[in-house]
C-alpha cells in the first residue's frame, strides 16, 4: 500500500505557518503499515492542486489531502477533488446540524458560506469532526482512495484518531488488528533513550517501536499486529516490560495527549492530597499547569508568586536576613519557600521554584541554575539543584515539568 500526503495552503507554502500535520499523518500511517512515499505542499490554487492530484494518481494508492476545507474562497480542496472524481458536492446533514447548533449557541447569524464546511463529494464516506465544523471524507474510486482532512492540527488530529484511523484499519489491516500504545517519558532525551533501547529498536519486527521527541519529553509508540486484539495487547505487554527494564525510571504515563501535570494532579486527587506552590523564576507557570487540569480545585486552593526578595519575605514570611545570607538562588531559600507556602495554606505538599532563568547571571549563578524545593507531608523538606540550558523560556518550562516529575516520584514512593 503506497500513500501520498498533499498539504494544501498558501500559508504553508510561504512558510508563514509550520506544517505539523503532515509529519503526524505520516507517523500514523507508518503505525498502520502503510508506506508514505511522497509528500507535497500546494498553495490555494485549484489548477495546481488538480495537477498534484493527477501526479499522485500515477504513483500512489491512498492520497490524503489536508487543509482547504473551510468556508472561505481560498478553501478549494473538496471542490477540486469532487471535480477530479466527477462527483457533485452534497450537504452532510449531521455536519450541517453541528454548524447550525454552533451559531445558535454563539447567538450569531450563520453566513451562507459556512454551508460549504458541511459539504462532501457525493458517494463518499463522511469523517466526523469532533472539535470543528468542517466535515472530512473518504472517497473510494476504482483504483485510488482519497481522504479529505482539515488543516488545523487540533481538528486534524482529533478527526484522524476518532474517525479516519478506524476506517483505514478496516480497509488495510488485511484481516489482522493493529493495536498501538503510547508510552511517555520525562527526564531523558531522545538520543539517550534510543541508545538505551537500540537493541529493541534495531531488531523490531512485530511489535514495532517508534520514538518521537516532544517538547521537554519523549514518547514511544509501540504497535502490534495480530489476529485478535487480546493477542496484540499481550505482545505489547511483553514489549513494554522490555522497554521499562531499560528506561522505566523515566516513564510517567500513557496516551497520545496525556501530560505529566495531568498524571500528577489526578494522583493527588486520588490520594486526596492538597498542594500549593511558591514560584520565583517560573512566575506562576506551575500553578497555571495545575489549573489547566479539570477538577484541580479539589486539591489546589491557591499559591504564591514571589519574584522579588521583598515578596519572598512579605508573602512567605521568610526572614530577610536569611534571604540575604543564603541568596534567593539557594538550597536554603528553596526549602524555606516550600515549607512556608505549605504552612501558610495548610496543605499536604508545598513546592517551590527559585533560580536564574537568564539570560544574565544572578548572585554569581549562571543562567539555567534552578533549585526546586519540596515539602512533602511529614517528610523532611528537601531541595534539588538542576542546571538547564537553552533559552529563558525553555529553562522555565523545564523547571515546571521537573517539579511535576519530582512530585510523581514522591507519590509513587508513598503508597
Image (spheres, rainbow, N blue to C red):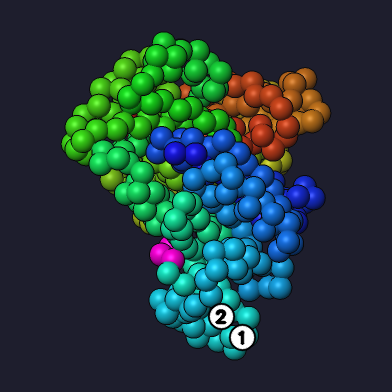
At 59% from the left edge and 63% from the top edge, which residue is drawn?
84
The answer to whether residue 277 is seen in the rendering is: no
User: As drawn, is 86 to the left or to the right of 93?
Assistant: right
Residue 119 point in image, percent of width and height: 52, 74
Magenta stretch prevailing secondary structure: strand
- Residue 251 lies, in percent from the top left, at 40, 27
Quarter of the image with the C terminus is top left
Residue at the image point whose x is 41% and y is 25% from the top: 209
Where disc 1 sits, the SS reads helix
Q: Quadrant of the N terminus?
A: top left
Instruction: Judge the density around disc 1: few (<14), some (14-19), many (≥20) Cα neighbours within 10 Å.
Output: few
Q: Which mark is residue 115?
A: 2
Where on the picture, by quarter, is residue 395?
top right
Q: Is residue 127 highlighted in magenta?
A: yes
Picture quarter containing residue 295? bottom left
- Return the residue nearer the eye: 92 or 292: 92
Picture quadrant of residue 250: top left
In three-dimensional space, the C-alpha distance between marks 1 and 2, rounded to whole angstroms, equals 6 Å
Left/right placement of residue 14 relative to residue 186 reads right
Residue 85 part of the magenta-drawn span: no
Q: Is residue 116 above or below residue 343?
A: below
The reply to whether callout 1 and callout 2 are in contact (CB within 8 Å) is: yes
111 w.r.t. 149: above or below: below
Dot 1 corresponds to which residue? 112
Q: Is residue 107 visible?
A: yes
**Range of magenta residues:** 124-128
**Residue depicted at 56% across the width and 80% down the height:** 115
Labelled disc at residue 275: none
Amino acid at each position: 500500500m503506497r500513500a501520498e500526503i498533499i498539504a494544501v495552503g498558501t500559508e504553508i507554502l510561504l512558510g508563514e505557518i509550520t506544517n505539523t500535520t503532515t509529519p503526524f499523518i505520516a507517523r500514523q500511517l507508518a503505525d498502520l503499515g502503510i508506506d508514505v512515499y511522497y509528500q507535497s505542499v500546494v498553495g490555494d490554487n485549484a489548477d495546481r492542486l488538480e495537477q498534484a492530484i493527477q501526479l499522485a494518481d500515477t504513483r500512489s494508492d491512498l492520497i490524503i489531502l489536508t487543509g482547504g476545507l473551510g468556508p472561505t474562497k481560498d478553501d478549494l480542496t473538496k471542490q477540486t477533488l469532487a471535480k477530479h472524481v466527477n462527483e457533485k458536492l452534497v450537504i452532510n446533514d449531521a455536519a450541517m446540524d453541528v454548524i447550525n447548533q454552533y451559531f445558535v449557541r454563539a447567538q450569531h447569524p450563520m453566513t451562507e458560506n459556512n454551508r460549504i464546511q458541511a459539504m462532501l463529494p457525493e458517494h463518499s464516506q463522511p469523517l466526523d469532526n469532533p472539535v470543528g465544523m468542517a466535515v472530512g471524507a473518504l472517497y473510494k474510486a476504482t483504483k485510488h482512495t482519497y481522504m479529505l482532512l482539515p488543516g488545523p492540527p487540533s481538528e486534524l488530529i482529533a478527526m484522524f484518531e476518532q474517525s479516519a484511523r478506524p476506517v483505514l484499519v478496516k480497509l488495510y489491516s488485511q484481516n489482522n488488528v493493529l493495536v498501538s500504545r503510547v508510552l511517555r517519558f520525562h527526564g531523558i532525551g531522545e538520543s539517550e533513550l534510543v541508545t538505551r533501547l537500540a537493541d529493541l529498536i534495531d531488531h523490531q519486527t512485530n511489535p514495532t517501536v517508534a520514538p518521537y521527541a516532544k517538547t521537554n519529553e519523549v514518547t514511544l509508540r509501540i504497535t502490534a499486529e495480530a489476529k485478535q486484539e487480546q493477542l496484540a495487547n499481550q505482545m505489547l505487554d511483553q514489549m513494554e516490560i522490555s522497554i521499562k527494564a531499560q528506561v522505566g525510571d523515566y516513564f510517567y504515563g500513557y496516551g497520545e495527549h496525556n501530560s505529566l501535570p495531568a498524571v500528577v494532579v489526578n494522583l493527588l486527587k486520588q490520594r486526596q492530597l492538597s498542594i500549593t506552590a511558591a514560584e520565583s523564576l517560573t512566575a506562576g507557570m506551575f500553578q497555571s499547569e495545575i489549573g489547566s487540569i479539570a477538577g484541580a480545585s479539589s486539591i489546589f486552593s491557591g499559591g504564591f508568586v514571589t519574584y522579588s526578595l521583598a515578596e519572598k519575605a512579605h508573602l512567605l514570611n521568610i526572614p530577610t536576613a536569611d534571604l540575604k545570607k543564603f541568596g534567593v538562588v539557594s538550597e536554603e531559600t528553596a526549602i524555606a519557600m516550600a515549607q512556608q507556602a505549605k504552612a501558610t495554606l495548610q496543605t499536604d505538599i508545598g513546592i517551590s521554584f527559585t533560580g536564574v532563568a537568564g539570560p544574565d547571571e544572578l548572585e554569581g549563578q549562571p543562567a539555567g541554575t534552578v533549585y526546586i524545593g519540596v515539602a512533602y507531608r511529614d517528610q523532611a523538606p528537601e531541595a534539588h539543584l538542576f542546571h538547564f540550558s537553552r533559552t529563558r523560556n525553555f529553562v522555565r518550562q523545564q523547571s515546571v515539568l521537573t517539579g511535576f516529575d519530582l512530585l510523581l516520584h514522591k507519590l509513587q514512593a508513598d503508597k
